[in-house]
Amino acid sequence: MENLERVVVVGASAAGVTTAETLRREGFTGSITLVGDEKALPYDRPPLSKQVLAGAWEPERTLLRPDSAYLDQGIGLTLGSAATALDLARRTVALSNGEEIGYDGLVIATGTRPRELPFGHDLAGVHVLRTVDDALALRGDLLRSASTVVVGAGFLGTEAAAAARLLGLDVTLVDPLPLPLVRQFGDRVASTIASLHEERGVQLRTGVSVAALHGEGAVSGVELTDGTLLPADVVLVAIGAMPATGWLTGSGVPVDDGVVCDATCQAADGVYAAGDVARWFNPHFGGLMRVEHRMNATEQGMAVARNLLGARIPFAPVPYFWTDQFDAKIQAYGVFPAEAEMVVVHGELAERKFVAHYLAHGRVVGVLGWNMARQLRQDRQLISPATAG
C-alpha cells in the first residue's frame, strides 16, 4: 500500500501478533497498534482445552510473547478495549473505552466467539471455553466436582472431555450427530475416536440433543431430548463458534460467515482479515474458505502483513490442524469433504497408528495421520487442487 504509515490490528490473537511482527520483520517503520478486548497479554488458545485445563501448564506458559517483546519491536498495545465500530470513509476504529484510532491499513483478526445454548447459561457451573479466564474458571469447577457433561463432540468438546476424564471426573459427551468428529473426518475415523473415549471411561450419548439444563442457581443436571436426565456438577457447552464480526455491522465491510476477502485476504480498501474471522478465496482449492485452526492464523497473519506492504500474493495454503486426546495425536492436512472416499494407505486403523488419504474426483484432497507424523508429512505432498465446497 502507498502512504502506509499507521497500521491498526484489531484482535490481540495469534493472527494479530503475527501480522504485527511480520510487518516489522519486513521493514515497516510506521506505527503499529494492536487492539485486544481482553486485559491479558496476547496468548495461545489451543493449550487452553488441553494443557491448561488438565493442569499441566500454568496460564503464563500460553503467552505468545513477553511484554518486553512488544516494546522492543515498537508495537503499541491497547488491551481491555473492544472495537465497537469501523468507519471506512474516515479510516477510523472506535473502541469501547471511548477512543477512536485512525489507520492507513487495518487488519481484522478478532477471531470467533462461542455459540451458547438458548437456555441455562445463567446457572453456576455452566461454561464455554474461549479465553484463558474461561479455562481457569472451568478447571476450578472441575476440581470441585464429580461429574461433568460436555455438550458438543467437535474438536473442543472431545479435547475437553479427555482432559476432564484425566482429572478423574465422570464425563458424558453429548452430541446430536451419531459419532464424535464425524462431520470433520467421516465414519471410520470418528468410530475410532469414539472407541478411544469409551475405553478411557467417557460415556457417549450421541444422536441426541440437550432439551434443558436443570438446577436452582447452579446446574445439577442435563435433560436430553430422549427424556434422559444426566447428573452434572459442571457443563461445558462446546457447540461451535461464530466469527466475531458484530462490530462491523453497517461498516460496508462484506460479512458472511466471517469477513469476506479476495485471494490476498483484502476485504475493502486498506482493510485485510486474518485468522478464524477471515473467509477468503483460496485459489488452491478454488473456493471461499474459513479455517479455525492455529497454523492458519500464523500463516495468514504473515501473508496479510506482506500484502499490506504491497506484495499482492494470493494466500493459497493447504490447511493443517491437529488434536491431542489421551494418547492420540491426530494431524490432518487439506480438506475433508463429506463425499470424499477415505483409504488407509499406511498402518492399521485398528491399531490406531495409520495414515489415511481422502479422495474426491480421483484426487487426494486431504491426508490424516494418527500417531504417524513422519509419514503424514511426506504424504502431504500428494494433495491436489480441488474444489473446497
Image (cartoon, rainbow, N blue to C red):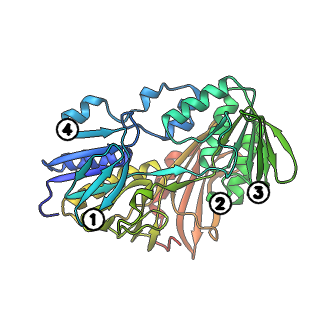
Horizontal and vertical percent for residue 103?
Answer: 21, 55
Disc 1 from disc 4: Cα separation: 28 Å
Horizontal and vertical percent for residue 8?
Answer: 25, 51
Estimate how packed mark 3 is, as few (under 14), some (14 to 19) or many (20 or more) residues with alpha carbons within 10 Å: some
Q: Is 367 on the left-hand or right-hand side of 287?
A: right
Residue type at tag 3: Pro
Mark 1 vs 4: CB contact within 8 A: no
Location of the N terminus (image quadrant): bottom left
Disc 3 from disc 2: Cα separation: 10 Å
Q: Residue at x 59, y 42 (%)?
A: 128
Q: Which mark is residue 88?
A: 1
Q: Residue at x 40, y 54 (%)?
A: 275
Q: Which residue is mark 4?
A: 73
Q: Which residue is mark 2?
A: 183
Q: Is 248 on the left-hand or right-hand side of 115?
A: left
Of marks 1 and 4, the one in the foreground:
1
Disc 1 from disc 3: Cα separation: 45 Å
From the viewer's perspective, is residue 103 above or below residue 311? above
Quadrant position of residue 186: bottom right
Of marks 4 and 3, the one in the foreground:
4
Estimate how packed mark 4 is, as few (under 14), some (14 to 19) or many (20 or more) residues with alpha carbons within 10 Å: some
Whichever of labels 3 and 2 marks the residue nearer the N terminus, that label is 3
Residue type at tag 2: Arg
Q: How many marks?
A: 4
Whichever of labels 1 and 4 marks the residue nearer the N terminus, that label is 4
Q: Residue furthest front?
A: 98
Q: Which residue is mark 3?
A: 178
Horizontal and vertical percent for residue 182?
Answer: 68, 57
Look at the numbered disc 4 and give the secondary structure of its residue.
loop
Residue type at tag 1: Leu
